[in-house]
Image: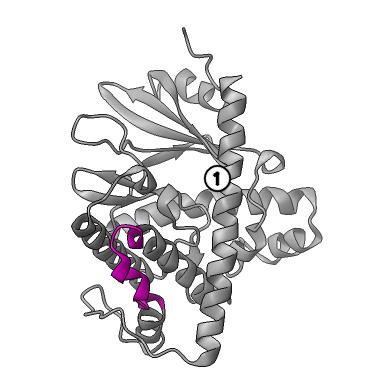
């Protein structure tokens, strides 16, 4: 069966930027990912969905602190005019490209960006030891030692991201791939400016606690760690570095404990809703 060329990829074929569309890899709430061929290399092409078709409802929360090109853009977004929507959409797409280059330079394990063409992001295809697309973290059955090791690596990646001024903002077992060298962080259009977003700590805590919950299923002692507060405390004090020695221990106030409990409840509900949505999408594809 020959795959019909997606509309978003046709300009790249016409311009010779890619040579063939191999197959669709994933369809998510914000974009579709295709495996494409450039010469002898297979890579991924991320085609963003139109804003009307996207299921991501917290856009304003993530875009706080991002700068438009001028006051006119800011006013247009505030009025929610057509121009405002276009500016907001452009910021959303450009954020992932910018974050990928910035994080790759900082040494974070992310797919290598290969450029943006007609609004389509080309990037490295992450594969396992057999050359097959790497699985998501949540699809891997971990040993306790693997869970500890990968959790340690991911906490280190979160620290490196924060030292580069960014927070993933939607990090979970679904947007971490595992290749032969360990975790690779993907999906960054919602990356948050740590210094300019009032929700920064809450998003950092959610990222950290999501990974704690995932790895804690296989190494239960991880469930008692408090890395988010420890990391943020060092960051606020100007003492956070990629080499920071972390313990996972932090004395929570009663208020901090209440916030953590609420965040955990909210995140559990969100993940359950996403799992139900994926189930519906899989059922529709089977039909």
Residue 99, image x and y in percent? 42, 56
Residue labelled with disc 1: 275
Q: Nearer the viewer, residue 277 or 54?
A: 277
Tell me if 114 is positioned left or right of 284 in this view: left
Which sits in the foreground, 26 or 220? 220
Front residue of this view, candidates 72 and 176: 176
Side (left or right) of 218 relative to 253: left
What is the x, y in percent for residue 41? 27, 26
Q: Is residue 264 above or below residue 189?
A: below
Q: Report the residue at 41% width, 86% height from top.
A: 236
**Rendered position, 64 above or below 232:** above
Taken as a whole, is the magenta stretch helix, strand or loop? helix
Q: List x then y, in percent, for residue 166.
A: 43, 67
Q: Which residues are magenta?
A: 215-228
Asked if residue 227 is among those painted magenta in the image, a careful observer would answer yes
Which image quadrant is residue 29 in? top right
- Residue ID at (60%, 43%): 276
In the image, taking residue 280 as reference, residue 19 lies left or right, namely left
Q: Could one spot residue 197 in this view of the protein?
A: no
Q: Quadrant of residue 218?
A: bottom left
- The secondary structure type at the circle numbered 1 is helix
């Amino acid at each position: 069966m020959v795959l019909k060329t997606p509309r978003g990829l046709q300009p790249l074929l016409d311009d010779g930027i890619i040579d063939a569309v191999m197959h669709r890899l994933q369809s998510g709430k914000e974009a579709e990912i295709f495996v494409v061929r450039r010469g002898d290399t297979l890579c991924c092409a991320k085609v963003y969905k139109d804003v009307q078709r996207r299921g991501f409802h917290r856009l304003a929360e993530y875009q706080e602190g991002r700068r438009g090109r001028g006051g006119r853009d800011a006013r247009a977004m505030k009025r929610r005019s057509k121009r405002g929507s276009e500016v907001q959409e452009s910021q959303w797409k450009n954020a992932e490209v910018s974050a990928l280059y910035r994080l790759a330079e900082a040494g974070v394990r992310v797919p290598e960006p290969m450029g943006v063409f007609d609004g389509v992001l080309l990037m490295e295809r992450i594969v396992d030891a057999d050359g097959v697309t790497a699985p998501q973290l949540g699809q891997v059955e971990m040993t306790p030692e693997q869970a500890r090791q990968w959790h340690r690596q991911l906490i280190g990646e979160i620290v490196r991201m924060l030292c580069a001024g960014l927070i993933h903002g939607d990090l979970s077992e679904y947007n971490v791939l595992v290749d032969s060298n360990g975790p690779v962080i993907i999906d960054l259009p919602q990356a948050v400016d740590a210094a300019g977003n009032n929700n920064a700590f809450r998003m950092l805590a959610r990222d950290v606690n999501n990974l704690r919950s995932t790895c804690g299923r296989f190494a239960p002692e991880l469930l008692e760690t408090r890395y988010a507060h420890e990391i943020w405390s060092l960051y606020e004090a100007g003492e956070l570095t990629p080499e920071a020695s972390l313990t996972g221990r932090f004395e929570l106030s009663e208020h901090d404990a209440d916030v953590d409990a609420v965040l955990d409840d909210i995140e559990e509900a969100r993940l359950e809703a996403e799992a139900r949505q994926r189930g519906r999408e899989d059922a529709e594809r089977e039909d």
